[in-house]
Image (cartoon, rainbow, N blue to C red):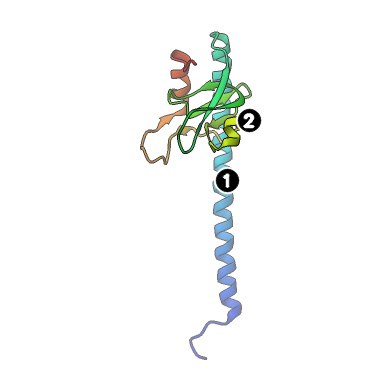
């Protein structure tokens, strides 16, 4: 057929597109990894400042996704926001303090998994509230979330 593209050329184009997509994904992952490493360094510095200031880690509770009473966890650390939705532990792990609030979690407690720490907290969130991590950590040095 005239004007048609041989299948070998079409697959080459698809392969090239796949390579571009793979390269973009690899670049995005590398960027996220660098951001997480920078954010973790800021958190480590903040943890050291908090300890020097006598701001001791406390047992952390997680909030059920569907609402309800906070659930105990095995974590100790510091809340980053007064609403207790973000926290860090002494090893500079960053946590989103939301968990399944089912009966098992209420009885046995929950163990939130560490998340990648961002340099800008709240970026992409629906409420539109964003803050630089460095500023948030400094706020907690001046005004820790207690209790």
Residue 29, numbered circle: 1
Does 134 sit above or below residue 122?
above
Badge 1 crowding class, 10 Å Cα cut-off, few under 14, some 14 to 19, many 20 or more, is few
Mark 2 or 1: in front is: 2
Q: Residue furthest bottom?
A: 1
- Residue at image coords 57%, 31%: 106
Q: Which residue is mark 2?
A: 108
Badge 2 crowding class, 10 Å Cα cut-off, few under 14, some 14 to 19, many 20 or more, is few
How far separated are the C-alphas under marks 2 and 1?
Answer: 35 Å
Image position, residue 145 (x, y; %): 47, 18
- Nearest to the observer: residue 70 or residue 141: 70
Q: Reading the chain from its start, which is encountered first: label 2 or label 1?
A: 1
**Total number of numbered discs in the rendering:** 2
Does 142 sit above or below residue 43?
above
- Residue at image coords 58%, 77%: 9
- Nearest to the observer: residue 31 or residue 61: 61
Q: Quadrant of residue 31?
A: top right
Image position, residue 25 (x, y; %): 56, 52
- Residue at image coords 55%, 41%: 32
Q: Secondary structure at mark 2?
A: helix
Camera sees residue 98:
yes
Does 110 sit above or below residue 22?
above
Q: Quadrant of residue 10?
A: bottom right
Camera sees residue 113:
no
Q: Secondary structure at mark 1?
A: helix
Image position, residue 134 (x, y; %): 47, 24
């Amino acid at each position: 057929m005239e004007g048609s593209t041989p299948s070998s050329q079409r697959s080459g184009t698809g392969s090239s597109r796949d390579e571009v997509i793979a390269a973009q994904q690899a670049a995005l992952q590398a960027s996220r990894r660098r951001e997480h490493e920078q954010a973790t360094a800021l958190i480590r510095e903040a943890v050291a400042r908090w300890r020097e200031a006598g701001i001791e880690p406390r047992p952390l509770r997680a909030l059920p996704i569907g609402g309800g009473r906070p659930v105990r966890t095995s974590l100790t650390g510091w809340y980053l926001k007064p609403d207790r939705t973000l926290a860090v532990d002494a090893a500079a792990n960053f946590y989103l303090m939301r968990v399944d609030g089912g009966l098992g979690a209420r009885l046995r407690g929950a163990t939130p998994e560490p998340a990648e720490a961002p340099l800008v907290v709240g970026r992409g969130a629906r409420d539109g509230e964003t803050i630089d991590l460095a500023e948030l950590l400094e706020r907690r040095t001046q005004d820790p979330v207690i209790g």
